[in-house]
Image: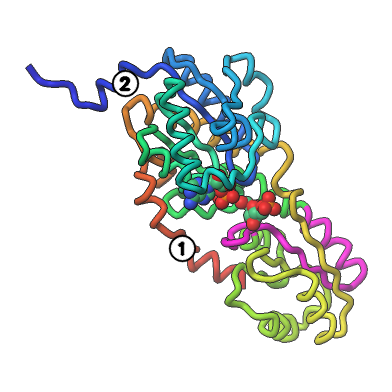
């Protein structure tokens, strides 16, 4: 007789899983929560939602979730479970306490919806024996092992709409506008929104200097329009001052900030959020601990967290070239 592998034995015992959102919110997180809850219930697993990221575990602040609790949320931005940074969880004591609470409450697995910081926390919980699955929810698209992260499409579309509006007024007044978009460590929102918004120039990372941009605007005789800048590549205000001083054209600074993170998710973020949330529960059911839900070649797959976190996302040369 063949022995059942360990993971299958675990499948049969699965009774309760937790779900939380952590780090920066991203539109589509609610779709992912909804899918986790519905898939868990359909598989006879009781889902519970921890409030405010890892704080919810440490403070034992949770909601027992049912289908009603996730009804009418797929179109909303933000996260019904709220999100937060939890500094206590970065400490070894906090992680130990979190794992003990999970064990004591019979939690068989946790789905963490968030960005790279949240996945480092998930990795720590996994090392302490709590099954964890990460779902990439960040507008920045900066998780190397996946082609998509929930929220990116909405953030880009909001940024493009803002850039289009700002461009109209910049053209009307024959002035430049520097538009600073989010992305502290990644320039994907800047690149995508800058290309789609027909920016005169794009600063996607800190390798481009203000002098180069001025040179570029001069070379093509631009006297108005938008310059898109990733938050991690520089600040809008000083950039606008340099352009105005060098080119003698009035230049306004615009910082889009939180406007890109909130609001109704696009259909893409609702659908990807739903698929990735449901897949997370399937991975837990299969006994796949310490994995990230990823999209590769447009297919869902699981990648081991520490392996996935080592991967960096390269920008396609073609895309980078279009942004010049
Ligand atoms: P994001 O997940 O969007 O990248 P953060 O980097 O702020 O956001 O991380 C979110 C939370 O994840 C932190 O507040 C903390 O609770 C947890 N976290 C981040 N880094 C670690 C770490 N090295 N160890 C344990 N927990 C971490
Ligand atoms: O993770 C998304 C993100 O929007 C980054 O681009 C940005 O650096 C960060 O969150 C800022 O978040 P907060 O202002 O909440 O610290």
Q: Between 23 and 258, which is closer to the camera in this rendering?
A: 23
Query: If the image is split into quadrants, where does the C terminus sit?
Result: bottom right
Secondary structure at badge 2 equals helix
Does 251 appear above or below 147?
below
Residue 74 picture location, percent across and down: 65, 28
Give how far across and how far down residue 254 sits, in percent: 81, 63
User: Left of 173 or right of it: where is 22?
Assistant: left
Q: Is residue 295 visible?
A: yes
Q: Quadrant of residue 235?
A: bottom right
Residue 26: x %, y % from top left:
63, 42
Q: Quadrant of residue 184?
A: bottom right
Left or right: residue 253 versus residue 107 is right
Residue at figure coordinates x 55%, y 68% from the top left: 320
Which residue, given by chain and number where applicable, does mark 1 sit on?
314
Q: Residue at x 63, y 35 (%)?
A: 52
Which residues make up the magenta segment? 162-189
Sequence-wise, which precedes: disc 1 or disc 2? 2
> Camera-side residue: 135 or 219?
135
Q: Is residue 67 part of the magenta span, yes or no?
A: no
Secondary structure under the numbered disc 1 in the rendered image: loop
The answer to whether residue 190 is above or below residue 156 is below
Residue sticking out furthest to the left: 1
Q: How is the image coloured?
A: rainbow
Against 323, residue 135 (above or below) is above
Residue 11: assigned label: 2
Q: Nearer the viewer, residue 275 or 20?
A: 20
Q: CA distance from mark 1 to mark 2?
A: 37 Å
């Amino acid at each position: 007789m063949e022995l059942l592998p360990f993971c299958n034995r675990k499948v049969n015992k699965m009774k309760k899983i937790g779900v939380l959102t952590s780090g920066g919110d991203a539109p589509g997180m609610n779709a992912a929560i909804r899918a986790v809850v519905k898939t868990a219930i359909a598989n006879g697993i009781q889902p519970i939602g921890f409030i405010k990221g890892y704080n919810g575990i440490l403070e034992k602040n949770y909601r027992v979730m049912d289908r009603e609790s996730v009804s009418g949320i797929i179109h909303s931005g933000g996260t019904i479970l709220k999100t937060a940074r939890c500094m206590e969880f970065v400490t070894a004591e906090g992680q130990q306490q979190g794992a003990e609470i999970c064990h004591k409450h019979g939690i068989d697995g946790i789905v963490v919806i968030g960005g790279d910081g949240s996945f480092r926390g998930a990795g720590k919980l996994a090392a302490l024996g709590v099954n964890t699955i990460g779902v990439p929810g960040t507008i920045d698209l900066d998780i190397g092992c996946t082609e998509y992260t929930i929220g990116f499409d909405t953030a880009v579309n909001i940024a493009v709409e803002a850039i289009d509006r700002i461009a109209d007024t910049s053209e009307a007044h024959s002035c430049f506008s520097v538009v600073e978009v989010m992305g502290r460590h990644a320039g994907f929102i800047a690149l995508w929104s800058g290309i789609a918004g027909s920016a005169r120039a794009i600063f996607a990372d800190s390798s481009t200097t203000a002098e180069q941009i001025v040179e570029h605007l001069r070379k093509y005789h631009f006297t108005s329009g938008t310059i898109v800048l990733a938050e991690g590549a520089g600040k809008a205000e000083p950039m606008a001052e340099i352009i105005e001083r060098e080119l003698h054209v009035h230049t306004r600074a615009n910082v889009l900030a939180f406007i890109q993170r909130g609001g109704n998710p696009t259909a893409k973020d609702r659908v990807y959020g739903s698929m990735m949330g449901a897949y997370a529960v399937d991975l837990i059911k299969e006994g796949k601990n310490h994995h990230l839900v990823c999209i590769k070649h447009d297919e869902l797959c699981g990648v081991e967290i520490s392996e996935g976190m080592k991967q960096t996302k390269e920008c396609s040369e073609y895309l980078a070239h279009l942004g010049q």
